[in-house]
Amino acid sequence: AAVAALPAADKTMLGDAVTNKAANQKILLKHVVFNKFTIRDLEKLDGGFPLATAAGDTLTLSKNPDGTVNVNSVPVIREDIKANNGVSHPVATVIK
């Protein structure tokens, strides 16, 4: 859903996963942080708390007045999807 929400130019930038694997991997790693954070943990980190990504970038968390969490101003649309290696929190669009 996040990729579908992108403008056409950004979708072109992503390219085909086979022909543009390095670029797609870097974009994916911008969405991965180390450690395991539940949504409750993330809510406690409000106030522009920075988190280092696997790509070497920084994500900044913020909380809306209604309590929902944003990552780099992008809303988290689903919370606490558990996996063997961590927790996933899908966001509304691809973080650049």
Image (tube, helix red, strand yellow):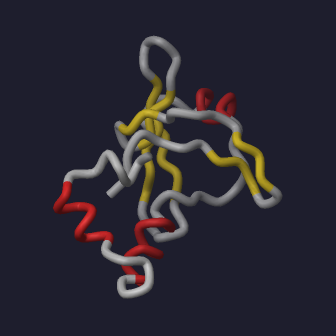
The outermost residue toward the left is: 9
- Which quadrant would the C terminus be assigned to in this image? bottom left
Residue drawn at x 37%, y 87% is 19
Residue 65 vs 74, above or below: the answer is above
4 or 90: nearer the viewer:
4
Residue drawn at x 59%, y 28% is 43
The outermost residue toward the top is: 66
Residue drawn at x 44%, y 46% is 1
Question: Where residue 56 sits: x, y (%)?
Answer: 46, 69
Question: Where residue 65 sits: x, y (%)?
Answer: 43, 13
Q: Is residue 33 left or right of residue 96?
A: right
Q: Is residue 31 left or right of residue 12?
A: right
Q: Is residue 73 left or right of residue 50?
A: left
Residue drawn at x 19%, y 57% is 8
Residue 59 vs 57, above or below: the answer is above
Question: Where residue 94 sits: x, y (%)?
Answer: 38, 52
